[in-house]
Image (tube, rainbow, N blue to C red):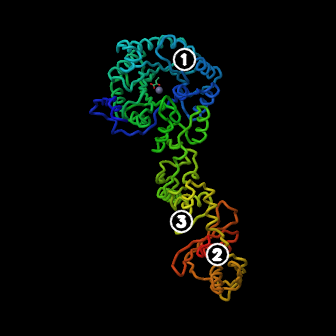
Amino acid sequence: MKPASIRKYRPFPAVSLPDRQWPNRIIDHAPRWCSVDLRDGNQALPQPMTVEEKLEFFDVLVRVGFKEIEVGFPSAADTEFNFLRRLIDENRIPEDVTIQVLVQTREHLIRRTFEAIAGARRAIVHIYNSTSPLQRRVTFGNASQDEIREIAAAGARLVKELVPSVPQTEVVLQYSPESFSDTELDFALECCNAVIDIWQPTPERKMIINLPDTVQWTTPNVHADMIEWMCRHLNRRDSLHVSLHTHNDRGTGTAATELGLMAGADRVEGTLFGNGERTGNLDIVNVALNLNSHGIATGLDFSDLPSLRAVYERVTRMSIPSRHPYVGELVFTAFSGSHQDAIKKGFDRRERELRDDPEVPWGVPYLTIDPQDVGRSYEAIIRINSQSGKGGVAYVLDHEHGFDLPKTMHPQVGQYIYGQADALSRELTNDEIRELFLQKFVNLESPMTLIDFEPSPGETKGEVACRATVRIGDQIFEGGGRGNGPINAFVHFLAEVGQKNFNVVDYRSHALRGGSDADSAAYVQLRRQDDGRLIWGCGVDSSIEMAGLRAVVSAWNLIHGEN
Ligand code: KIV
Ligand code: ZN
C-alpha cells in the first residue's frame, strides 16, 4: 500500500495475559467438529445450492463423519426451511448426527426456527447477535452495551420458553457473540454470561459458547489469548463446549483454530476446503489432516479427497486452487531437481525399511503425509520441466514405466530429458518422458543395426562363441567372436570387424515392470577410447540376451553420435 493508504489503519490491541498457558500446550486429541458448509458456506455462494444439491452435500458430510451439521438458517428463506423439513420428514438424519440451525436473536425468527426443527430427534439451536463496538456503532446506530446484552438475553429467554414446544426434540443450545473477534473481551464475556445464566447448563447438559473470529483483524496468537481469557472467565466452564469459528481474512484461519484449541476450546466449526464468506471459513479438511499428520485420529474420513473435491466443486461451483493444502493439484508435486532427488530417495528407503518394519513412521522429504492416505497417487508426485533434475526423470521412468536405470545413468538421461523440456518451454507428461527416453536411448539402430546374432557353446566351460552380422551405414560386417558371455562375444566380434573403439564398463538388466511380461531391459555403459567419455545405452527385448546386445548397440550408436 501507499503510505497515504497505510495511515488509514491502526494496530490491533494485544490482550493482557502475562501468564498465558496456551503456548506451552500441545494438541493431543481432536475437537468436536461441526460443518457449517450448508449455512455459512452456502450463504456465501454466488449461486447457492439447490435443495437437491444440499441433500447430496448433507449425505457427503455424513459419510465423512460429521456428527454435527449446521443445515441452514431456516427462518431466513423458504428454501432453507423446506430443505430442513425434507431432512426431518424424509428421515434422512442418521441417529448419531445432530443438525444445527442458526438464527438471529429476533423473536419472529426464533419462533419460525422452532417450527422448522419440530420432529427432529436432536437439534442445536444456535442464536447470535453482533457485539463489537464497530457493529454497535455502525449497524445498530450507536446501541449501548446494555442494549446489545439485552438483545442476547431476550433471545435466550425466548429460546428457553420455546424448548418445551418441541417435545420430541432434544434441544442443545448455542450462543455466539457475533464479531467476537473485535469485541471488548469483558463485554463479550458479559453477553455470554448473560445467556449462560438464563440457560443454566450443567455438566450433564452442556451448552455451546461459540466465539467467532467473524472477521480476522489480528494475528492468531491474539486470537488464542482471547480464547484462553474467555475460557478462564466464562461462568460454568465445566458446563460449556467452547467452540471456535474462524474465518480467513488474514489467511490464518487454520493457525487461529490450532492456537485456539491450544488455548482451551473444544469444538471447531468450519467448512470443507474453506468455503465461506469473503476469504472463507476455516478449512476443516486442513485442520483435520494436520492432526492426522501428527498421528491424531479425528473421526473424519478424508481418505478420498479427489472424490470429495469433485462433489464439492460441482455443487458449490467453486474451484480449489492448485496450491491448496492437501487437495490442490500441485501439492504432492515437486518440480525442483533437488526435491525430486530427495523424494525418490525417500520412497526407495521407505520401501526397504517397510520390509523390516511395517509400522515404520512416515519420513519422505518434502511430503508431510503419504499422498495415498488421502487418495492421491504417487504418479502425480513428480513432474518434469526444465527445472527438474536427474532424480525426477529416473523416478518417473521407474515408477511409471518400469525402467530401473542404473544410478550412474541418471545424469545422462536426466540432462537430456530436461533439456527437451527447456527447449519446449513447458512441462513434460509422463508419457512424453517415456517416448523421449525410448527414442534417445533404447534399441537404437543407426548408424549400426544388429542384423543377426547366433550364439553357440565355446571351447572352454562358460565360454560363448557367436556369429554376428551388423550393418553400419551401407556396409555389412559379418564375423565371429568369443567371450565369457554373449555380450563379451559380441564385443570381440566388433573388435574383429574393426568397430571396437570402446571398453565395456558396466552392465545391468532386469525384467521390465509394466511392459509385456516377457520383456527385459538391459543397460550397458561404454567408455570411448579416444576421450574416455562414458555413455549408457539401453536395450529392450523379450530375450534378456538380446536386450544386452541391443544395449551395446545403442551405446555404440550414441558414441558415434547420430542420436
Ligand atoms: O462468522 C460468524 O460470526 C458467524 C456467526 C453467525 C456464528 O457465522
Ligand atoms: Zn461465519
Q: Which residue is mark 2?
A: 553
Q: Position of residue 178 (x, y in %)?
A: 42, 22
Provide the secondary structure element on which disc 1 rests.
Answer: loop
Q: Position of residue 168 (x, y in %)?
A: 57, 16
Q: Which residue is mark 3?
A: 410
Task: Name the residue rendered at 28%, 30% in the picture.
Answer: 16
Q: Amino acid at mark 2?
A: Val
Q: Amino acid at mark 3?
A: His
- Badge 2: how crowded within 10 Å, few (<14), some, or many (20+)? many
Mark 2 to mark 1 CA distance (whole Å): 77 Å
Q: Position of residue 181 (x, y in %)?
A: 38, 27
Q: Position of residue 250 (x, y in %)?
A: 41, 34
- Between residues 309 and 416, which one lies in front from this camera angle? 416
Counting labels gives 3
Provide the secondary structure element on which disc 2 rests.
Answer: helix
Residue depth check, mark 2 versus mark 1: number of the one nearer the observer? 2
Q: Which residue is mark 1?
A: 76
Ligand 2 within 8 A of label 3's CB?
no
Q: Is residue 450 left or right of residue 204?
A: right
Q: Is residue 327 left or right of residue 557?
A: left
